[in-house]
Image (cartoon, helix red, strand yellow):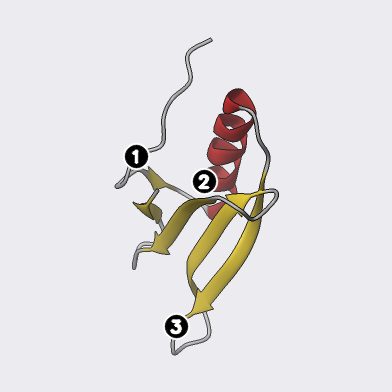
Amino acid sequence: GNVVNPAVGTSFDSLDEAYQFYNLYSWEVGFGIRYSKSWLNVERVKCMQEIVCGCAVRFLIFLSVSKKHEYYAIET
């Protein structure tokens, strides 16, 4: 099948949707992923999430949360 490559600016409706997208992509190209660091804003709400390959050697994606609670890929 066709592999959809990640791109900066891709938006997701939830963190779970973003994780599932990158999980599918990672398995298609030969590795697994896991959650890594996350950041909270001043209201103690998660505002960024890092997803890395399973061995934590390769940085995969940095997600930022918009005011509409959508997740955006800001670095790949």
Please name the residue that numbered disc 3 is placed on: 41
In front of the other: label 1 or label 3? 1
Mark 1 or 3, nearer chain start:
1
Give the residue type at disc 2.
Answer: Ala
| Vertical placement of residue 1 versus 74, above or below | above
Marks 1/3: CA–CA distance: 25 Å
| Rendered image: mark on residue 71 | none
Image-based side of 20 in relation to 2, left or right: right
Please name the residue that numbered disc 2 is placed on: 18
Q: Residue at x 44, y 89 (%)?
A: 42
Marks 2/1: CA–CA distance: 12 Å
Badge 3 element = loop
- Is residue 69 among the parts visible in the rendering? no
| Rendered image: mark on residue 7 | 1
Marks 2/3: CA–CA distance: 20 Å
The number of discs equals 3
Mark 2 or 1, nearer chain start:
1
- Is residue 67 among the parts visible in the rendering? yes
